[in-house]
Amino acid sequence: METSLDCIPCFFSQLLAGARIAGAPPEIQKRVLDEFACMLPGIPLDAPPPEIARMGYSILNKTGLNGDLYKEIKRESNRLALSVYAELKERAFNSEDRLLAAAELAIAGNIIDFGAKRDIDIKKELQRIVSGGKKSIRGKQVFDFEEFKNALDEAENILYLADNAGEAVFDRVLLEVIKDLYPAKELLYAVKEKPVINDALAEDAVDCGIGSSARIISNGSDAPGTVLRLCSEEFREIYLHADAVISKGQGNFETLSAEKKLIFFLFLVKCPAVANETGCEEGDAVLLCNLKNGNS
Amino acid sequence: METSLDCIPCFFSQLLAGARIAGAPPEIQKRVLDEFACMLPGIPLDAPPPEIARMGYSILNKTGLNGDLYKEIKRESNRLALSVYAELKERAFNSEDRLLAAAELAIAGNIIDFGAKRDIDIKKELQRIVSGGKKSIRGKQVFDFEEFKNALDEAENILYLADNAGEAVFDRVLLEVIKDLYPAKELLYAVKEKPVINDALAEDAVDCGIGSSARIISNGSDAPGTVLRLCSEEFREIYLHADAVISKGQGNFETLSAEKKLIFFLFLVKCPAVANETGCEEGDAVLLCNLKNGNS
């Protein structure tokens, strides 16, 4: 998916939020925005938004705001999500259609995002999901669940692309349901190599308990999505040989939507640009198969 | 009020909306954003937001997107607002407290704004106001109505600073109530000299029927607010000698909030920066006297 001009104001908002999270004083916050502004005329709009966002986040590092800015937020997200893990698991495993219930929960968990949305109350959102039942998922104009189920039936190995910390607990429930349904299949869970926003790293995947059902791997990159040419060669090999890919979050959708490979994008629509791209509304839950309409 | 760093993404959104309204193709839209981005490092954040926004809008002109971009939108706003004028007037004049009712309506009419909010449905908003009665006004944490009433009692001449086209019909009702209560007072209605967003020009004030209760004057400027040093000397004289000023909209608040003069700011809070400045929430109706707390 190409970058929309509507993404430009959002890049500035994201960077400002990042600089603030990093505890930068206002003059440094302004300098970060100024530096990104100076890059703007040279920015290639045919690149997907996370690639441009990554250029912005690199300014935060250059400006001395190094390190894992969202570390504490991620840790807290993991902790809070783990506190509802038993309820999530019970809900999924007690459902008539376990796979559907777990997929819906995995999408609902995509709310834990400090990129596209910057002022979420995780505790409140988790409460909403846990108590909301069916109502915690809305939209579903694009929900290719039959294709998803069929693909899992057929795939021998499945690559799961993580999005955010905390959200990984929801991914765990989906992975556990898949593991239960298909004990022989190989499940890989790919996280980012280096910190970017609140995207899950290997340590988050471990903390959230992914390890019992899937092998945790790194994609070798710090783009807030999956920019294949920035990923490690090792990851690209794995990606190439995956029979089916489960991709979480807008960032992975934005960077992989044009791929000619069987990918299932599970995410909440969080901005007008992606709403426009998918024909959905902001807030909608999406399960989108990119090869559904003969797009192969 | 100084420009907040939070205003920066919003400037880009406003400019993009303006370029689109002008019918510019995407490459020109991008060039407008690029030019503003290049200006960003030199922008003085101690200036009020409308002054910076004006610098942005001047790029639209420079880029060949000349003229009155929002002319059709303004004309349609005037037409739609005039279609409910009789109802608005009846509501105000049949109220127990006519001045209060008319002031509330004038604030409600501030919804007709293509600067801070860019995708409003005027027809729907007007319907909401007309049918909503008291409910069309919410918030009112800051509502210095007693001070407002006392100031009008005492003032011999009153300067009313317009904001948007269409909204002028709501201003007209307030002006008519004031004229009815105080037939001897001089009422001046100041509009922008040149087009900026959908701000009212003299022709809009005339179309909306302001002429029967107030004298229409120009402030000599095209800033989306009242930047006194950019206004004509004639206007500054009038401003200086006004006993009380009624100021509509966020733009006028942002540019005049630090003035040591009796000004009543009537507006809807439309962004986090102004919400923060006023201690209100977005969507709140505000009637704020800037000299209330010994701020003289």
Image: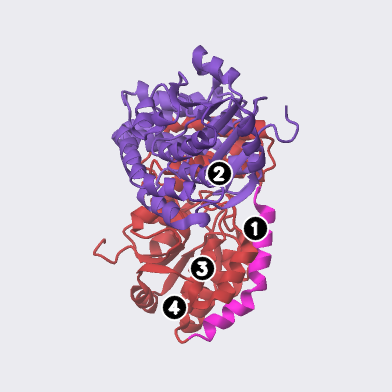
Chain colours: A purple, B red
Q: Is residue B89 magenta?
A: yes
Q: Residue furthest right?
A: A294
Residue B177 pos. (x, y %): 51, 79
Residue matched to label 2: A269
Q: CA distance from mark 4 to mark 1?
A: 27 Å
Residue matched to label 3: B108
Viewer-side label of 1, 2: 2
The answer to whether any part of residue A140 appears in the image is: yes
Q: Residue furthest left?
A: B294
Q: Secondary structure at mark 3?
A: helix
Residue matched to label 1: B74
Going by the numbered disc 1, the residue's amino acid type is: Lys
Pick whichever of labels 4 and 1 is earlier in the sequence. 1
Q: CA distance from mark 1 to mark 2?
A: 33 Å
Check the image and report above or below for A295 versus B181: above
Residue matched to label 4: B100
